């Protein structure tokens, strides 16, 4: 697949808006940001991410959300298992890394026990609201 993309983009240029001015630049990386082909290829690539996930996994562009009901310890364990055994393994197998600094836990509900979760060996920070 990389060979086909490299061949197709060789010698191409793309424009990027910098304020009011459009600047044309040669394509130096595989797929320029903002190119429709990039989003399509990314969606094909992440399609297998939810294989084996027990909780709800939502994907939009390059954002991924793992959701689950945590009214008992089993719910907490299911989320942590999906983080450890499914998402982290998928990332390693596909030579990708999650940006752990951007990962957040959003606790919803009045009686939410507000458990802590890890991605790899790092604790995920809690957030008081969902970033839009």
Image (cartoon, helix red, strand yellow):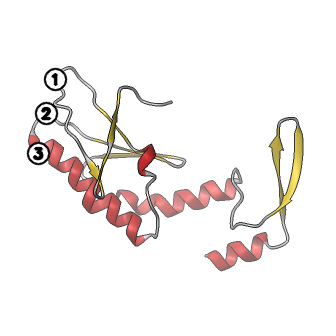
Q: From what the image shows, is residue 129 above or below residue 48?
A: above
Name the mark on residue 111. 1
Picture quadrant of residue 72 = top left
Image side of residue 104 versus residue 63, left or right: left
Q: In this view of the protein, which residue sits in the foreground, 25 or 2?
A: 25
**How much space separates mark 2 and mark 1, taking CA atoms?**
8 Å
**Foreground disc of the pair 2, 1:** 1
The earlier-in-sequence mark between 3 and 1 is: 3
Residue drawn at the location 51% of the way across and 63% of the way down: 45
Q: Which residue is mark 3?
A: 74
* Element at label 1: loop
Question: Is any part of residue 45 visible from this angle?
Answer: yes
**In the rendered structure, are the residues bearing label 2 and label 1 in contact, judged by CB atoms less than 8 Å apart?**
yes
Picture quadrant of residue 81 = bottom left
Residue drawn at the location 71% of the way across and 54% of the way down: 35
* Element at label 3: helix
Q: Position of residue 120 (x, y in %)?
A: 30, 58
* Element at label 2: loop
Q: Position of residue 112 (x, y in %)?
A: 19, 28
Q: From what the image shows, is residue 103 above or below residue 38?
A: above
**How much space separates mark 2 and mark 3, taking CA atoms?**
8 Å
* Image mark count: 3
Image side of residue 124 versus residue 114, left or right: right
């Amino acid at each position: 697949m990389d060979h086909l993309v490299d061949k197709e983009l060789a010698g191409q240029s793309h424009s990027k808006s910098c304020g009011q001015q459009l600047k044309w630049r040669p394509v130096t990386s595989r797929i320029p940001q903002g190119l429709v082909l990039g989003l399509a290829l990314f969606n094909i690539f992440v399609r297998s991410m939810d294989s084996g996930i027990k909780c709800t996994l939502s994907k939009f562009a390059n954002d991924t959300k793992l959701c689950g009901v945590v009214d008992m310890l089993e719910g907490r364990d299911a989320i942590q298992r999906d983080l450890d055994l499914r998402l982290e393994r998928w990332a390693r197998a596909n030579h990708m890394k999650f940006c752990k600094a951007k990962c957040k836990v959003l606790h919803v509900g009045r009686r939410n026990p507000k458990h802590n979760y890890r991605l790899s060996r790092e604790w995920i920070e809690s957030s008081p609201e969902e970033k839009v």
